[in-house]
Image: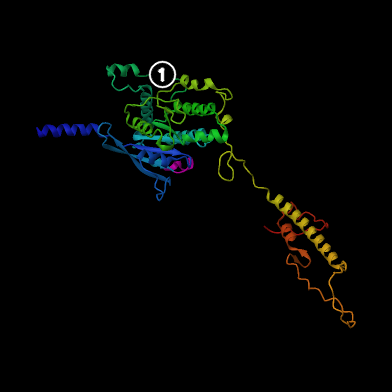
Amino acid sequence: MWKQLLSEAHSQASQTKLRPKNLIVLGEEGCGKSALINRIQGRKAAEDRPQGTGLEFTFIDIKDEESDEIVERMGVYTLNGDTDSASLLDLLLTNELVGDTLVMLVVDFSRPWNALDTLDRWSVKLLELLGKLDADLLEKLKKARVDAYQTYAEPVPEGTADKEGEEEAEKIVNVLGPDMLKVNLGVPVLVVATKSDAQVKLEQDLGYRQEKLDFIQLHLRQFAMKHGASLVYSGKGGKNKEILYQAIVNAAYGTSLKIKANPEDNQGVFIPAGWDTPEKIKQLALSFQEVSEDAQYGEHIEDPGVDATGNAGGDVHEAENEQGFLTKQKQLLGKDKDAGQNAGQNEKMDVARPRPHVEHDVPRPNVHKTPSKPTADPPGPTPRPDPAKKDGKDVLTDFFESLLKTGKDGKKAPTKGGATAPATPR
């Protein structure tokens, strides 16, 4: 009896044991990659722990659906920086590991103008890195991706009487069109748009209307369909956290999804791999008025620039040319100098002008006065040397003149007096 129980327990453990998998997380700096993984793990980002430095490693607990017990830990590698750091991925994309690897491409919805360019850059870089693998192995992996994409099945509602029949009815076999899985990387791909709640700010600050948000979704879905990827929007408060977790597990282990596609919720879009078609995507364009479905992404989703406070939508101020700035300062200095000289002359004239004698109606004592001798005016204060002048020359003016660039012949432009000053080496 005990022998039989142990045998059954061992059999069940073998069935629930999963192969170790690796998740590679890629995206532009500041898009929220580390925060996204922390959210899936159910913990807050640790302020004292560096995040996204080099190739950061952590893990996600994979739990059994029925018992909620941890059956495996998926390794998560988050790459810091853009495609310039992609050489670090050679450690993971090897012939031995690539079969148990999936990729998550993260874009930032608070900066939607960068989204498509980020995805395209990583697509090209991943094709380059995966192209180094064994050709036969890569072909085998690509075939597995086609099979998984074509056999997507809609989730079956719980409590269905004829569950097996419903599964067959809901099953979808996608005949690959020209835009479906056109770019087959050979590994499962997920596209995640973080900070989807930023749509409110985009609407308030930049005037994004619903059709612009639909235009962004249209292009993200086209990219996902072309790469055979799932698309998930993620926002504040852990929105779509459980959906993202299920999408990761489904992509890694081929488990069935229990959540249906949701293209309607602006901040909670979920498009599973294999569900989308060009016809479904075109439904987004039916309400377009000011936006053209066939327009390039950058035509309608433009970078508004960043102002001095870092807020999107501000004007971009370019630094003034150095020589132009110095010339203006020299001119202003000359004006101040002339104004100062005029003020000094007026003050001297004012001092030299005789003051009118004013009789005050004050009684004076009748005192006999002895006529006094006329005395000379007391000497005025000794003028101090102007620190702004050196040998009669304005120091600041001379300073600005020395900063001005010389011409091609190595000589300065003539001054007002016609003389040229030697160039100051810089």
Quadrant (top left/top right/bottom left/bottom right) for the C terminus:
bottom right
- What span is colored magenta in the figure? 80-88
Residue 125 appears in the picture as rendered: no
Within 10 Å of the Cα at label 1, are there few (<14), some (14-19), or many (20+) other Cα atoms? few
Drawn side of residue 300 relative to residue 256, left or right: right
Q: Which residue is drawn at 72% across and 57% down?
A: 400
**Where on the picture, by quarter, is residue 337?**
bottom right
Front one among 317 and 237: 237
Q: Name the residue under label 1.
A: 175
Drawn side of residue 143 relative to residue 317, left or right: left
78 over 176 or under it: above or below: below
Residue 64 location (% of width, % of height): 27, 33
Q: Which colour scheme is used?
A: rainbow
Q: What amino acid type is highlighted by mark number 1? A: Val
Residue 260 location (% of width, % of height): 38, 25
- Magenta segment, principal secondary structure? helix
Residue 265 location (% of width, % of height): 45, 27
Q: Is residue 325 magenta?
A: no
